[in-house]
Every structure is written in structure tokens, then in C-alpha cells.
């Protein structure tokens, strides 16, 4: 065939060129199509991967929704075991019931005195509980003396001053207030976006006052067990009094301190009971006692006004997204611990408008990782710029970087 073709090309001056052109354009079209096919295959693979991730996300969200829909459980103590299916239980409000036992529970652990959770409708025992609320188990973080100092809190000079005045001074020199005859605030409320230094500031105060730092997250107090949230608040304050001088840092206070609404679900009512207990604890201790409370929230707009009444959190301190000068100060703090080479900090400050303190720290950590990957021992301006590009991508995807670790999650 090729030989024949060549003969034809030799006898006819026009045809051979046309055939060549056709062949070439066919080959080009074929290679274009092949490229397009490959591209479509790649696209399909990445879409399939994305679909898998989204499916997993849906599953997780559905689980969360189911958890949220679950009515709260009632806490009680077993008084007597009648047989392997029935027991006598005293609930947390004092009522005694004869209830059925869930057959999945270990019968050896079901003894008189055991703390159990009861289904609100059927009152059957569905879960065994820890004997007492252990702050370490329930999400409270207790640090005898934090190592953070005011020097670690950058770009928040005014806020540091306000917190020192409201928390540190009454703890360190209560006599000043007694002499003048004024009552210091019991606590302060720090409001501002995530990762801007609220926890850091609270830790620094605890360090400077030699106080124990007890951190509790509001969502941990929003319990599914009836009466448990209030009990945890009570125990949190009694732990703080026992460990005094102490600073309670109540993060995400909005989880239990949101405005009270009518027609709420039983879960909401439980959260409200926890808030009432918190208000009672706040009112119940003396402002001159050596327990101080610092609360923090990203959502001051939804807080119940009751929390902001005089004698409670009557001092609100705003911790904003850092401006140019604050970003420079925060970057300087974090870069000061690193081995750097001719860093142009002004350029980095310009490129990180809108970054939180946590994101600035994450930028420094990421730049350090880039240097390590390149087997270098110091971080350059270019590493910082590359790290910023990576952070920008994360931010564009809507992933908030609350801590440097979040970069790697
Ligand atoms: P959240 O609302 O998420 O609890 P937060 O405001 O309490 O956030 P922090 O936990 O204090 O934020 O900040 C996270 C990390 O970001 C800190 O451990 C610190 O490394 C860095 N950081 C944040 N703000 C500052 C700052 N002003 N100076 C120095 N480092 C900061």
C-alpha cells in the first residue's frame, strides 16, 4: 500500500501533498483528542476523589445532626438491682423509679451506687457514667502555672493593660481596692475573632499572678445529660476555689451563654439551666476572693444580656484582627525564636493583611518547614512568601487556621 501510494504521489503532482496534509491533520486531531481524553480522565479521577470526600463529610454531618437531635439523658444513681432486667434508680432530682436495664450494659458494673444515664422518655438505663466529674476527663485543662508571659502576647498593649488592671491587680494587691472602697470586676469578657490571642492573654495573666489556670470550653459544658452541665459549672468553681489563687478561662462562652429564646427544645433548656448555674456562681463569690474569671467568645452578638450585668462580666475587652503594627509585633515574636536570614518584615506585613495571630504563627512554622525540606538551616524572605501563598490557598478554601497544627490537619 505504501509502495502504491508512493507511485501515485510520483505520477500525480497534486494528490501526494493532499494526502500528506490529511495524514498530518488526522495525526494532529488524534493527538489533540488523546490529550483531551487524558484530561477528562484526570478530571474524572479528581471529581471522584472529591465526591468521596464530600460523601464522608455528609456522613459526619449526618452523625452530628443525629447527635443534636438526641434528647438529653437524665442522670441518676442505682439504688437496688431487682434482677438482670430491672433496677431501682434515684434520678438527679430525687425521684425514685423502677426502670429497665439495657442488656448491652455489663451486669458486673451495675451495682447499687453506680451513676447511670437514663433515657428521658422510657427511663431505661442506657449508659454507665464516671463516678465523679473529673475535670481532666471532661475537657478542662488545668495548668498550675502557665509559661506564657506578657512578652509573648504581641500587638495587644492596650488590651494587656485593661486585663492587668481588672484581673491581675485585684489578685496581687486586693488591699488597694479595699482602701479606696471600690469593688474590682469579677471577670472580663474577651471578644474577637479566633486565633487572635484571647487564650494567650488569659495564660499570661495567670502566669504573672502565680495563679492556677483552668481552661474550660463552653461546648463541653453544654451537656446532653440533664443536670450535668450545672453540676460541671459548680465543680469548676469549687475546683478554682480549692486551687486559689486561680483564673478560670471559659472559652466559647456563647455555647452556654446565648440569648434565651421561648419555645426551645429540651436540649436548649438544659443549656439554659447551665447558664443559670454559671450566673449563680458568678453572683455567689466575692469579687475580692482570689478566683477570677476570663471568658472569651467570637460571637458577642448572641450573648444573653444577663451575663453582661454589673457584677458579672461588666468589662468587655475587644481583641481585634491585628493591624499593620500588631502584625509586625506578632511576626517579630515568632521569628525571634527562629534561625532567619535577611527577612524583609515590611513586605511580609504588607502581604498578610487580615491574618490572625494564629495564621501569622502558622506562616512562620510553614516557612521553617520549607527550609527543612530544602535541607537549609535558616528561613529566608522567599520561604516566608511561599508560606504566605500556601496559607492564602487555605484561606481561599475557607479553612480557618486557628493554630499552626491546623495547617497539617
Ligand atoms: P480561639 O477563639 O480560637 O480560642 P484565641 O483568640 O484564643 O482563639 P489563641 O489560642 O490565643 O487564640 O492563639 C492561637 C495561637 O496564635 C497562639 O498560641 C499564638 O501562637 C498565636 N497568636 C495569636 N495571637 C497572638 C498574639 N497577639 N501574639 C503572639 N502570638 C499570637
Image: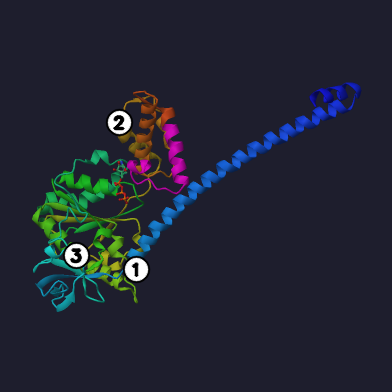
Q: Which residues are magenta?
A: 384-409
- Sequence-earlier tag: 1 or 2: 1
Seen from the viewer's position, the closer of residues 285 and 25 is 25
Residue 184's spot in the image, x, y percent? 17, 58
- Sequence-earlier tag: 2 or 3: 3
Q: CA distance from mark 1 to mark 2?
A: 49 Å
The kind of secondary structure the magenta stretch mainly shows is helix
Residue 196's spot in the image, x, y percent? 33, 47
Residue tagged 3: 105
The label nearer to you, 1 versus 2, is: 1
Looking at the rendering, which quadrant does residue 238 occupy?
bottom left
Judge whether residue 184 is colored magenta: no
Give yes or no for contact between labels 1 and 2 (Cβ–Cβ under 8 Å): no
Residue 83's spot in the image, x, y percent? 12, 74
Q: State the quadrant of the N terminus.
A: top right
Is any part of residue 219 visible from this angle?
yes
Q: CA distance from mark 2 to mark 3?
A: 55 Å
Seen from the viewer's position, the closer of residues 158 and 352 is 352
Residue tagged 2: 336
Residue tagged 1: 69
Residue 150's spot in the image, x, y percent? 23, 41
| Vertical placement of residue 38 versus 263, above or below | above
| Lateral position of residue 75 relative to residue 308, left or right | left
Q: CA distance from mark 3 to mark 1?
A: 23 Å
Q: Secondary structure at mark 3?
A: loop
| Vertical placement of residue 315 versus 11, above or below | below
- Sequence-earlier tag: 3 or 1: 1
The label nearer to you, 2 versus 3, is: 3
Amino acid at each position: 500500500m505504501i509502495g502504491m501510494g508512493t507511485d501515485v504521489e510520483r505520477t500525480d503532482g497534486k494528490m501526494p501533498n493532499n494526502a500528506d496534509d490529511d495524514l498530518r491533520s488526522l495525526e494532529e486531531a488524534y493527538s489533540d483528542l488523546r490529550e483531551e481524553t487524558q484530561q477528562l480522565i484526570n478530571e474524572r479521577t479528581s471529581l471522584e476523589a472529591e465526591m468521596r470526600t464530600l460523601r464522608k463529610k455528609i456522613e459526619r454531618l449526618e452523625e452530628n445532626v443525629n447527635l443534636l437531635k438526641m434528647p438529653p439523658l437524665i442522670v441518676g444513681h442505682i439504688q437496688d438491682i431487682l434482677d438482670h432486667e430491672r433496677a431501682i434508680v434515684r434520678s438527679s432530682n430525687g425521684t425514685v423509679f423502677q426502670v429497665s436495664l439495657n442488656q448491652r450494659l455489663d451486669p458486673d458494673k451495675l451495682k447499687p451506687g453506680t451513676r447511670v444515664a437514663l433515657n428521658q422518655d422510657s427511663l431505661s438505663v442506657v449508659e454507665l457514667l464516671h463516678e465523679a466529674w473529673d475535670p481532666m476527663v471532661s475537657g478542662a485543662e488545668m495548668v498550675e502555672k502557665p509559661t506564657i508571659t506578657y512578652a509573648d502576647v504581641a500587638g495587644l498593649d492596650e488590651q494587656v493593660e485593661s486585663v492587668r488592671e481588672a484581673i491581675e491587680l485585684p489578685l496581687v494587691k486586693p488591699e488597694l481596692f479595699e482602701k479606696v472602697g471600690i469593688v474590682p470586676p469579677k471577670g472580663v469578657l474577651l471578644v474577637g475573632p479566633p486565633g487572635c490571642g484571647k487564650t494567650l492573654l488569659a495564660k499570661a495573666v495567670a502566669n504573672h499572678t502565680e495563679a492556677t489556670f483552668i481552661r474550660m470550653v463552653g461546648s463541653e459544658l453544654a451537656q446532653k445529660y440533664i443536670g450535668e452541665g450545672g453540676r460541671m459549672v459548680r465543680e469548676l468553681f469549687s475546683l478554682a476555689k480549692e486551687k486559689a489563687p486561680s483564673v478560670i478561662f471559659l472559652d466559647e462562652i456563647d455555647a452556654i451563654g446565648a440569648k434565651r429564646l421561648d419555645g426551645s427544645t429540651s436540649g436548649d433548656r438544659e443549656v439554659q439551666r447551665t447558664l443559670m448555674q454559671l450566673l449563680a456562681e458568678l453572683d455567689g463569690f466575692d469579687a475580692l476572693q482570689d478566683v477570677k474569671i476570663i471568658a472569651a467568645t467570637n460571637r458577642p452578638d448572641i450573648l444573653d444580656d444577663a451575663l453582661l450585668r454589673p457584677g458579672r462580666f461588666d468589662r468587655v475587652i475587644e481583641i481585634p484582627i491585628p493591624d499593620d503594627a500588631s502584625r509586625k509585633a506578632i511576626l517579630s515574636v515568632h521569628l525571634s525564636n527562629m534561625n532567619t536570614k535577611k527577612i524583609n518584615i515590611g513586605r511580609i506585613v504588607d502581604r498578610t493583611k487580615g491574618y490572625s495571630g494564629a495564621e501569622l504563627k502558622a506562616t512562620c512554622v510553614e516557612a521553617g518547614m520549607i527550609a527543612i525540606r530544602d535541607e537549609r538551616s535558616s528561613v529566608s524572605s522567599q520561604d516566608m512568601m511561599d508560606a504566605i501563598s500556601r496559607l492564602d490557598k487555605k484561606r481561599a478554601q475557607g479553612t480557618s487556621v486557628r493554630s499552626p497544627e491546623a495547617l497539617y490537619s
